[in-house]
Image (cartoon, helix red, strand yellow):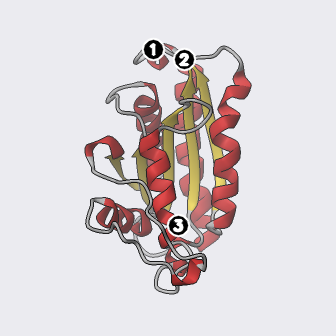
């Protein structure tokens, strides 16, 4: 961070490409590009990331017994980014299983001496979509993610949550798309200011 272009990585937790959270992430990435960042996107459903295995109680001494799957190269892309966009639908009062597996697997790395400094100082954006008309349903994702960012010693840059169910319908919600794009632009500017 702080050298060269700001890297923004979107992690898509939905199994639906061109679904609502995918579209929202595209808008964040577009806003980031407008601020001069380079962007990329990972569809977590395209990879085999198994649930976390048994690990040591001491987070500084953990090993990842399942590192023979796709998680380690995905983690490397995560660690190389300056801003992470966590984009997931709300499934059963939480993020998708794809996103949850990614989050859980970080438990073997986030406090390990070899990796700890690479987790720190990143910007984090959270996007979510849910079928309920009640806006607080976004809290099922945003509240735990705020705590996650705190544990990772990152910077929570904001979130956009949308009450939308049908695939792709968020395209008809200009206020949501605009908020996502603005968040992407502002996130890049904020991270640049933080890293000097």
x and y, in percent, of residue 172 in the image = 48, 13
> In the rendered view, does 191 fall on the left or right side of 6?
right
Above or below, 179 against 68 in this view is: above
> In the rendered view, does 23 fall on the left or right side of 155?
left
Q: Residue 169 carries which label?
A: 1
x and y, in percent, of residue 16 in the image = 34, 28
Above or below, 126 against 57 in this view is: above
Q: Residues within 10 Å of mark 3 (few under 14, many from 20)?
A: some
The span from disc 2 to disc 1 (Cα, nearest Å) is 7 Å
Q: How crowded is mark 1: few (under 14 residues within 10 Å), some or many (20 or more)?
A: few
Question: Is 186 in front, or is 94?
Answer: 94
Residue receiving disc 3: 107
Q: State the residue at coordinates (58%, 73%).
A: 120
**Label 3 with label 2: CB-CB less than 8 Å:** no
Q: Which mark is residue 104?
A: none
**Label 1's element?**
helix
* Circle nearer the viewer, 3 or 1: 3
**Label 3's element?**
helix
Residue receiving disc 2: 164
Q: State the residue at coordinates (34%, 61%).
A: 71
Question: Is 150 in front, or is 101?
Answer: 101
x and y, in percent, of residue 107 in the image = 53, 66
The span from disc 3 to disc 2 (Cα, nearest Å) is 31 Å
């Amino acid at each position: 961070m702080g050298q060269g272009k700001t890297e923004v990585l979107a992690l898509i937790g939905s199994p639906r490409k061109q679904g609502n959270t995918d579209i929202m992430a595209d808008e964040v990435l577009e806003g980031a590009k407008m601020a001069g960042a380079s962007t990329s996107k990972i569809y977590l459903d395209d990879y085999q990331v198994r649930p976390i295995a048994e690990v040591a109680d001491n987070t500084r001494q953990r090993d990842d017994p399942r590192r023979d799957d796709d998680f380690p190269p995905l983690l490397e892309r995560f660690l190389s980014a300056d801003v992470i966009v966590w984009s997931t639908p709300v499934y059963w009062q939480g993020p998708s299983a794809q996103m949850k597996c990614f989050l859980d697997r970080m438990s073997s790395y986030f406090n390990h001496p070899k990796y700890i400094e690479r987790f720190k100082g990143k910007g984090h954006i959270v996007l979510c979509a849910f079928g309920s008309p009640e806006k607080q349903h976004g809290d099922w994702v945003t509240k735990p993610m705020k705590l996650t960012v705190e544990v990772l010693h990152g910077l929570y840059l904001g979130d956009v949550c949308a009450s939308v169910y049908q695939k792709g319908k968020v395209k008809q919600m200009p206020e949501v798309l605009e908020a996502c794009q603005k968040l992407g632009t502002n996130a890049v500017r904020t991270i640049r200011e933080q890293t000097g």
